[in-house]
Amino acid sequence: MSLSLRKAVSVTLLAASLATLSAACGRQQSATGAPPFDNAGGGPAPSAVVTPPPTPTASAPAAPAPSTAGSPPAGGAVSTRRMYFEQTTRGVPAVHTVLDNERDLARFPGYFMKSDPRIADAIASRAARTDFSRSVLVAWSRTTGCNSTKDAVLFRNGSRLLLGLAQTPMGRCLVANQVIVLFEVPRDRMPKEPRFTQEQNPRADPPAPGRTVAFNSLNGSEAPRGRRSAEVTTDRQLDAFLANLPRRDADTVRKQLAGQPRRGDERRFGFVLSGCRPTGAVLTIGRRELSAAPIGDEHIRCIQAQYYVAVLSVPSRLVPAHARLID
């Protein structure tokens, strides 16, 4: 990273840090105009705008150019290399997270499979050789307004991570720009609990879309009859899926779901999985398919695998059109 770039982003970073801590922070809208997701819902958390960008309309005023004065935040740049950078107007989700292992990396592109599969594939390809024994990946996607972003740098100040952007003012625009950046960071340079300072919710988003709303072991050693995966968003779909399970197990799933009311903008999918005492399940979103896998049993060996039922939810706007379930 050149000295000029460090200077170009420094004041923007510091101003953004102060702005985030003030009451002026607002909820970021994606370029599609859809509201951001609540982090608890398994989708990207809302973002705070670094420097309030102009509304993406033909009459939007020009955004101010970043200053070139000042010095980088204490701690300096932490990434060894920028694995991926893209500016887009495709309305991709705003997300900020840390990818800690190969499984996280395999699932993370699911955030972009519906909005721009090309970005999803490029991220997976360019980061495929990451050595997770030495490094982690920091992924950051956010709206940047009408300005054109040419480069990005990741800074650390204590436990806080800050995204520096080198931008060129472009005047008015019809659609807001967004940037997607992936940094490789040595593990010894990463804070244990990183805080994405410029975001309204500074905690890291889940490494991939989807959350578990029900998970339970099944009685018996034989696989249940019928389909092992199905959409269960509606009551009718849920009844049809649970009809293939022992009644006691079906009742347990219903009780768990009763404590997780369905949100308006989400779809739910049920899976019957096998594993050696897993503790949960995760969802993987591909170009045209959805699949689930158990987690928590990666280092456990057993003579005979057990069967489990899992129900996972995901924001509907992240599910690719015509996606099919893979058992």
Image: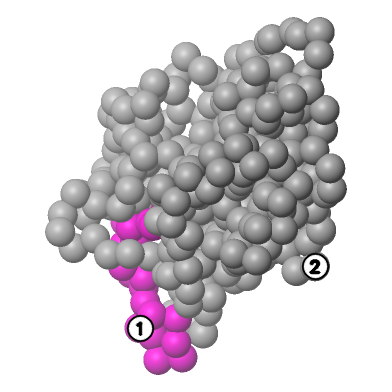
* Residue 214 lies in quadrant: top right
Instruction: Answer whether residue 236 is magenta in the image.
Output: no
Instruction: Answer whether residue 50 is magenta in the image.
Output: yes
Q: Position of residue 199 (x, y in %)?
A: 34, 50
Q: Position of residue 231 (x, y in %)?
A: 70, 58
Q: Secondary structure at mark 1?
A: loop
Name the residue tied to disc 2: 322
Q: Is residue 102 left or right of residue 158?
A: right
Name the residue tied to disc 1: 61
- The foreground one among 173 and 46 is 46
Q: Position of residue 206 (x, y in %)?
A: 51, 41
Q: Is residue 197 visible?
A: yes
Q: Amino acid at mark 1?
A: Pro
Q: Residue at x 74, y 34 (%)?
A: 273
Q: Is residue 53 left or right of residue 150?
A: left
Q: Residue at x 45, y 19 (%)?
A: 189
Q: Is residue 255 left or right of residue 112?
A: left
Q: Position of residue 151 (x, y in %)?
A: 54, 50
Q: How many numbered marks appear?
A: 2
- Residue 216 sits above or below residue 42 on the image: above
- The foreground one among 89 and 9 is 89
What stretch of residues is rendered in magenta?
45-69
Q: Amino acid at mark 2?
A: His
Q: Residue at x 78, y 61 (%)?
A: 323
Mark 2 neighbour density, 10 Å: few (under 14) some (14–19) many (20 or more): few
Q: Secondary structure at mark 2?
A: loop
Depth check, mark 2 against mark 1: the one in front is 2
- Residue 57 sits above or below residue 120 on the image: below
Principal secondary structure, stretch drawn in magenta? loop
